[in-house]
Image (cartoon, grey):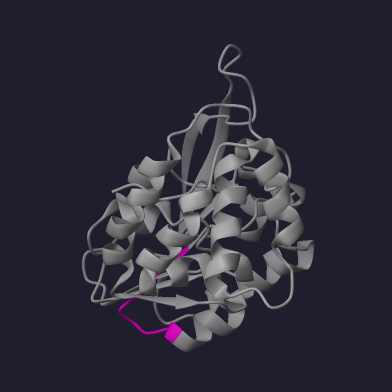
């Protein structure tokens, strides 16, 4: 199945190539930088234990509301329209005190769905069947019913779930492209992620942009070159974007 949202850096176009690298003998699967969860949703089940994590509190709240309260969220979304005014109302209301988790999740969902390129800031001027996307939340809730949803720093999360039979999939903000992401990620965080992964007992798959610094940082690991269409350029002027999949097995 598909994810119910899009997200900056989403792996819709690369998910199959990433999943092709998965080992067969894993008992737990952990998405460390969850985002839209395209890799997670692609299969009915990756392992007996599955974990979705992200540091964006509004995103995690949305996932939890879809998992536990899909009907209440759908009811809250009854008012949603493809409207510029409504989009900016959601932005202005997202941090209002006293709002319930359901109300905040509905507004954040609206921000994602109605923004241009899921940037959460600018209104995307295009038609969309909102009722169809809202109805899809029931299927998403069923898929998430057995998934643990976390809101933790990646280093603590990796320590918590590390086992020999664990597979960590990491899709961090890309190097020198951090400004496009909603969550803060500094150059030292790339090093901190490398150090955390170098100490694990389990296995990891890591997706990154193909650049000299990342190749230097992960020298000695298995690096697989892939490419996809660059989502940030017009379809009339297509350009291929080079990425690498890194793994420790």
Q: Name the residue: 68% across, 73% down.
A: 192
* Whole-percent x, y for residue 29 in the image: 35, 71
Viewer-nearest residue: 69 or 140? 69
Viewer-nearest residue: 148 or 15? 148
Q: Which residues are magenta?
A: 161-169
Query: In the picture provided, is 107 more to the left or to the right than 70?
Result: right
* Whole-percent x, y for residue 42 in the image: 30, 51
Q: Is residue 67 above or below residue 123?
A: below
Quadrant assignment, res 165 = bottom left
Q: Is residue 27 above or below residue 228?
A: below
Viewer-nearest residue: 166 or 134? 134
Viewer-nearest residue: 187 or 87? 87
* Whole-percent x, y for residue 85 in the image: 71, 40
Q: Is residue 86 above or below residue 39?
A: above
Could you tell me if residue 56 is visible in this image? no
Q: Name the residue: 58% across, 29% down.
A: 230
Q: Name the residue: 37% across, 74% down.
A: 68
**On the rendered image, what quadrant is the C terminus found in?**
bottom left
Could you tell me if residue 158 is visible in this image? yes
Query: In the picture provided, is 36 more to the left or to the right than 15?
Result: right
């Amino acid at each position: 199945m598909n994810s119910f949202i899009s997200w900056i850096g989403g792996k819709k176009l690369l998910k199959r190539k990433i999943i092709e690298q998965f080992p067969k003998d894993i008992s737990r699967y952990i998405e460390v930088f969850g985002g839209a969860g395209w890799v997670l949703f692609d299969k009915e089940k990756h392992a007996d234990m599955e974990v979705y994590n992200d540091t964006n509190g509004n995103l995690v709240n949305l996932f939890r509301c879809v998992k536990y309260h899909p009907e209440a969220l759908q009811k809250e979304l009854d008012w949603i329209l493809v409207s510029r005014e409504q989009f900016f109302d959601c932005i202005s209301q997202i941090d209002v005190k006293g709002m319930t988790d359901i109300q905040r999740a509905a507004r954040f969902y609206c921000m994602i769905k109605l923004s241009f390129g899921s940037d959460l800031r600018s209104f995307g001027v295009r038609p969309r069947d909102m009722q169809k996307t809202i109805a899809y939340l029931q299927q998403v809730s069923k898929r998430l019913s057995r998934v643990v949803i976390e809101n933790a720093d990646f280093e603590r999360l990796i320590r918590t779930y590390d086992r020999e039979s664990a597979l960590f999939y990491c899709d961090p903000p890309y190097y020198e492209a951090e400004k496009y992401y909603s969550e803060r990620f500094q150059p030292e965080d790339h090093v901190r992620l490398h150090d955390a992964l170098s100490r694990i007992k389990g296995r990891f798959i890591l997706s990154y942009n193909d650049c000299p610094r990342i190749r230097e940082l992960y020298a000695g690991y298995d690096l697989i070159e892939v490419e996809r269409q660059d989502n940030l350029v017009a379809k009339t002027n297509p350009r291929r974007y080079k990425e690498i999949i890194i793994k420790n097995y």
